Image: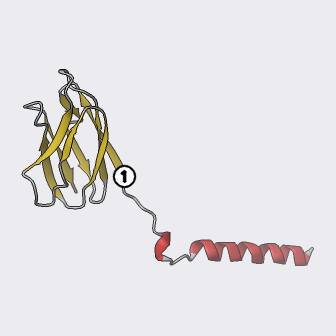
Amino acid sequence: MRVSRGLAIAGLAAVLLVVGCSTSPDSKISTNQTFDIFTVGDSFSPFFATVNAGDTVRWNFAGGSDGQGHNVRFTPAGSGAPSDINVLKTGTASRVFATRGTFNYVCDVHPGMNGSVTVQ
């Protein structure tokens, strides 16, 4: 009985040691998230998104009220803004935001359709 209890305690200690002491760089847990923006009629919903650096924003496209698609063009281009998204009637397109700042965007197909992503 004493031997069994001793082996059980030794086994538990070994498991705790292995689980609690991992220093492998591959053991890092990713905390990046994906945020969805939808096209609803001729608007983006939500209009504004706040994300952390490294997060992904995914635009979900549905045709506009006129049956046309939508695009996403960042204004101004550059300065850490991701690449623009060409016109899509349906489907999704994602961009990773690596640079902190506020990135405004518009849909060229529908004047007045705009939004922004703020990266913390």
Tell me where residue 2 appears, x and y as whole percent: 90, 77
> Residue 44, located in which quarter of the rendered image?
top left
Tell me where residue 32 appears, x and y as whole percent: 36, 57
Q: Residue at x 21, y 25 (%)?
A: 64
Tell me where residue 91 appears, x and y as whole percent: 32, 36
> Residue 19, located in which quarter of the rendered image?
bottom right
Q: Amino acid at mark 1?
A: Gln
Foreground of the two, 37 or 107: 107
Q: Residue at x 22, y 57 (%)?
A: 120
Foreground of the two, 96 or 118: 96
Horizontal side of residue 32 vs 12, given as left or right: left
Q: Residue at x 30, y 33 (%)?
A: 90
Horizontal side of residue 22 vs 67, given as left or right: right
110 shown above or below 102 = above
| Quadrant showing the N terminus | bottom right
Tell me where residue 69 appears, x and y as whole percent: 21, 31
> Residue 101, located in which quarter of the rendered image?
bottom left
Horizontal side of residue 67 vs 55, given as left or right: left
29 shown above or below 108 = below
**Where does label 1 land, which residue?**
33
Quick one: which residue is furthest to the right in this view? 1
> In terms of secondary structure, where does tag 1 sit?
loop
